Image (tube, grey):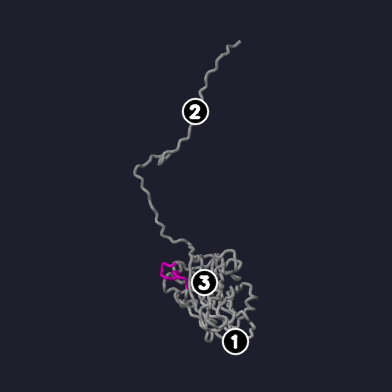
């Protein structure tokens, strides 16, 4: 019978290696250099696109009068998706009507200098301004706040309303616009203004009117991405104060002003004199043109030619 050992040989158990944090600056498999040299790269290229917010304020004094014994509406039109704000003042000063701006406004014509029309402050101020640093601009959101406050006057007037309506085409409204036509428009807002309706000086029975318009070109025009729709971009010709500029091919507009509450009154009366205050806030994306057909309008049969 073979000999069997009664006692077992002790087996050494290897200790578990505890993980220790590596010393700061230690390099595995390499010799750590005492004198470390780092090369710094300075970025000199501007971003491909940037987003900025702009604000514009103005105050207007508005006096409405009968024209040939007839009531008439009084309004102006602004651009919602263009850096140049004013679109038209055709029906602001018809006849003896008064529409005075605290800061004069002027429209911009395509192909003229960027400074030729009223734009947002700091948009085209100097050559480092965003509007001149980039050749394309697209408004991605606009908020317009309009307030009408009756002002003290002895002018007789009738019930008056402040209105605002968004339009995608050049306005077809004239000074014969009445409140019934506004109520049949889907994007119209109407607020009553109270004050001086007896023809005497104000005695405290006044009520201001306020309208807030929020506009998004994507939602309003049912667009998925503005980057693929070149028609919503305005453009400048060069990064210079002498550069020319153009509106977007697709312009959306906001028409606002005063209208009589009665479309068939017993006695024709003008609208009440008011002070209108306007605040326009816009978020704009700036970018450079890309050599890509996707950002241009749909190509006709036979393709499209891109001219550099």
129 relative to 202, above or below = above
Q: Residues within 10 Å of mark 3 (few under 14, many from 20)?
A: many
Q: Of circles 2 and 1, which is in front?
A: 1
Point out which mark residue 82 bears.
3
Circles 2 and 3: CB distance less than 8 Å? no
Q: Residue at x 41, y 69 (%)?
A: 127
The residue closer to the viewer here, 100 or 280, is 100
Point out which mark residue 43 bears.
none
Does the magenta-highlighted stretch encompass residue 125? yes
CA–CA distance in space, label 2 to label 1: 104 Å
Does the magenta-highlighted stretch encompass residue 102? no
CA–CA distance in space, label 2 to label 3: 74 Å
Circles 3 and 1: CB distance less than 8 Å? no
First to last magenta residue range:
119-129
Tag 1's secondary structure?
Answer: loop
56 relative to 48, above or below = below
Q: Of circles 3 and 1, which is in front?
A: 1
User: Is any part of residue 124 visible from this angle?
Assistant: yes
Q: Residue at x 50, y 30 (%)?
A: 16
Q: Residue at x 41, y 59 (%)?
A: 44
CA–CA distance in space, label 3 to label 1: 35 Å
Q: How many marks?
A: 3
Residue farthest to the top, as pictured:
1
Q: Which residue is mark 1?
A: 70
Q: Is residue 299 left or right of residue 117?
A: right
Image quadrant occupied by the N terminus: top right
Point out which mark residue 15 bears.
2
Q: Position of residue 33 (x, y in %)?
A: 36, 42
């Amino acid at each position: 019978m073979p000999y069997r050992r009664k006692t077992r040989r002790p087996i050494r158990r290897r200790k578990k290696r505890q993980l220790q944090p590596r010393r700061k600056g230690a390099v595995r498999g390499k010799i750590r250099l005492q004198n470390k040299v780092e090369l710094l790269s300075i970025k000199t290229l501007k971003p491909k696109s940037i987003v900025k917010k702009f604000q514009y304020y103005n105050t207007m004094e508005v006096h409405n009068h009968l024209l040939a014994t007839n009531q008439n509406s009084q309004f102006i039109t602004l651009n919602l998706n263009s850096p140049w704000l004013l679109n038209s003042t055709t029906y602001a000063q018809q006849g003896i009507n008064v529409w005075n701006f605290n800061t004069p406004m002027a429209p911009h014509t395509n192909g003229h200098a960027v400074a030729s029309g009223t734009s947002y402050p700091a948009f085209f101020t100097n050559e480092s301004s965003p509007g001149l640093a980039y050749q394309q601009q697209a408004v991605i959101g606009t908020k317009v706040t309009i307030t009408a406050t009756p002002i003290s006057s002895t002018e007789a007037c009738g019930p008056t309303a402040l209105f605002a309506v968004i339009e995608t085409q050049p306005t077809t409204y004239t000074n014969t616009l009445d409140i019934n036509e506004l109520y049949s428009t889907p994007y119209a807002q109407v607020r009553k203004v109270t004050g001086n309706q007896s023809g005497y000086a104000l005695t405290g029975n006044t009520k201001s009117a306020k309208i807030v318009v929020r506009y998004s070109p994507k939602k309003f025009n049912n667009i998925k991405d503005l980057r693929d729709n070149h028609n919503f971009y305005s453009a400048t010709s060069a990064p210079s104060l002498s550069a020319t500029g153009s509106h977007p091919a697709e312009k959306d507009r906001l028409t606002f002003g005063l209208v009589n509450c009665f479309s068939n009154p017993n006695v024709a009366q003008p609208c009440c004199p008011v002070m209108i205050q306007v605040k326009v806030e816009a978020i704009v994306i700036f970018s450079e043109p890309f050599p890509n057909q996707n950002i241009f309008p749909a190509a006709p049969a036979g393709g499209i030619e891109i001219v550099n």
